[in-house]
Amino acid sequence: MKDWQYQLAKKALFKLDAEQAHHVSMGMLRRAESLKVLKFLMKKPVMTKPVECMGLTFPNPVGLAAGLDKEGNTIDALGRLGFGFIEIGTITPLPQAGNPTPRLFRIIEEEAIINRMGFNNCGVEQGVENVKAARTFKKNGGIVGFNIGKNKLTSNEDAVSDYLKALRGCWGVADYVTVNISSPNTPGLRDLQAADDTARLIEALKNEQHKLMSETGLKMPIALKVAPDMGEEQIADLSKVFLDGGLECLIATNTTIDREAVRGKPFATQAGGLSGAPVTAKSTEVIAAFHSHLGERVPIIGVGGIMCADDAKEKFDAGAKLVQLYTGFIYHGPPLVQDILASLNK
């Protein structure tokens, strides 16, 4: 797909409500894949050198962040667009509807999105079945991540139980699991980023991981996703927790609650997480700060405001081993994936 073709499609989709446009576009992708025409519509992905991370071989370092394919029912279709890995979710132990609508807003002139979706998803049981039904992407070497969270009605005191249920439920189905404690749209969730709480959560998850590995003979690395809204002291404290706890990967960063970059813009006062171009620099700074503490001992997946190939390069230069797209993909489509991969080959 050429850039002008995507921009034409985007123009039509952006006439719809943001969430409606999401459902329409994902439905169209699934339909095109089921009819076996998507592989002919998309040009062959640019080939890059595979990347080793978490003990896994990623065919290329450009992935799709969690949030777009919340239920894991579009993996094969999205896999046709050039991604080396796709992360589904966030998925909670039990299905939940998420927050009331409207809950997704575009700030077009800033190439940004505000969302307060609230972990709307089908639950772990159905999510697992959806991943199992995806055959083409994994058959072609694509990596699938399973992003997990706690249910809204589960208290922070019982959050560990939810994460353990989700880990057990998806064990061995995807290639890695991401623990989401950084969404601003589940009340109190970010409180789990306090160093002591994070340490307890990682310890419980690692104990369960070792138990499941012993029982099944299967390995499933654990990554943890953090917010961009933290200072140097918290970054240093969490880095020590990650190193001491044996975390296998860090994903930095989720959306921001800071509105300074979009002050006065339409929808800027809406509650939720801000993503896209306004978070580019903030995310890169957090990646660099974590990398200064972690080095190569805990690999980092960089995500947040990657709107062009140069933004991806800055994430890599800051210390990211892999990158993920979300809002940039919505605004620039499959050509963005190709541009980044082509730039890596130069």
Image (cartoon, rainbow, N blue to C red):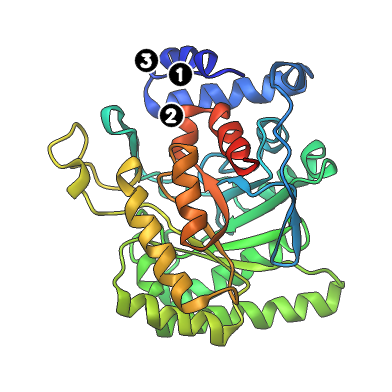
For badge 2, the amino acid type reads: Tyr
* Residue of label 1: 10
* Residue 47 image offset from top left, x and y in percent: 73, 38
Between the C-alphas of marks 2 and 3, the distance is 13 Å
- Which residue type carries mark 3? Lys
The answer to whether 111 appears left or right of 262 in the picture is right
Q: What residue is shown at x 43% (from left), y 37% (from top)?
A: 307
The crowding category of the residue bearing disc 1, from other C-alpha atoms within 10 Å (few below 14, some 14 to 19, many at least 20), is some
Q: Please name the residue that numbered disc 3 is placed on.
A: 15
Q: Rounded to the nearest whole Å, what is the CA distance between mark 1 and mark 3?
A: 9 Å
**Mark 1 against mark 3, which lies toward the viewer?**
1
Describe the element under mark 2 as helix, strand or loop.
helix
Q: Secondary structure at mark 3?
A: loop
The local secondary structure at tag 1 comes to helix
Of the 4 image quadrants, the one containing the C terminus is top right
Reading the chain from its start, which is encountered first: label 1 or label 3? Answer: 1
Q: Are marks 1 and 2 in contact (CB under 8 Å)?
A: yes
Give percent across and percent down for residue 3. 52, 19
**Residue matched to label 2:** 331
Q: Is residue 209 visible?
A: yes
Circle nearer the N terminus (1, 2):
1
**In percent of the image, x 18 and y 49: which residue is there?**
260
Q: Residue furthest left?
A: 264
Residue in view at x 45 percent, y 18 percent: 10
- Is residue 150 visible in the rendered image? The answer is no
